[in-house]
Image (cartoon, rainbow, N blue to C red):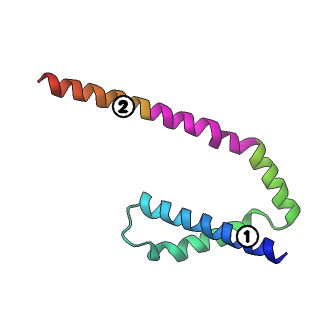
Amino acid sequence: VFTLLITVFFKASIFFYGALIGIVDLFKLKNHQQIILPIAFIIIFLSMAMASSYSEHTEEGVYFTRYIIGYFHVVIPLLMLLVTLIRNRFKKKGRLKSNIT
């Protein structure tokens, strides 16, 4: 049980840090310390609001695994690939026009 608690703590800490760095980078903040407490409160609130018991938590996990995770593994990467291809095409056209003039 002790090993499980320690691994869950470290996993949650790593996810928290990743979310923190991602938000700081996304909003171009200079210091990550000003956003630590708001993100921590949001995570605590959402963890208590999403599931009140272990069985409810399991049901949420099954729904997420079945329906939501496909979008994160298939749809979003395909959209990102499409956007990247379109951006590269416009960059190449811009370079060709600048070389011609």
Residue 20 place in picture, x, y as percent: 52, 66
- For label 2, the SS is helix
**Magenta segment main secondary structure:** helix
- Which amino acid type corresponds to the residue marked 1 in the rendered image? Thr
Which range of residues does the magenta coloring cover?
67-83
- Out of 69 and 95, give the one closest to the viewer: 95
- Mark 1 / mark 2, whichever is N-terminal: 1
Q: CA distance from mark 1 to mark 2?
A: 42 Å
At x 48% / y 31%, what residue is drawn? Answer: 82
Q: Which mark is residue 7?
A: 1
Where the C terminus falls, by quadrant? top left
Residue 65 in the image: above or below residue 32: above
At x 61% / y 66%, what residue is drawn? Answer: 14
Q: Which residue is mark 2?
A: 88
Residue 67 place in picture, x, y as percent: 74, 42
- Which amino acid type corresponds to the residue marked 2 in the rendered image? Asn
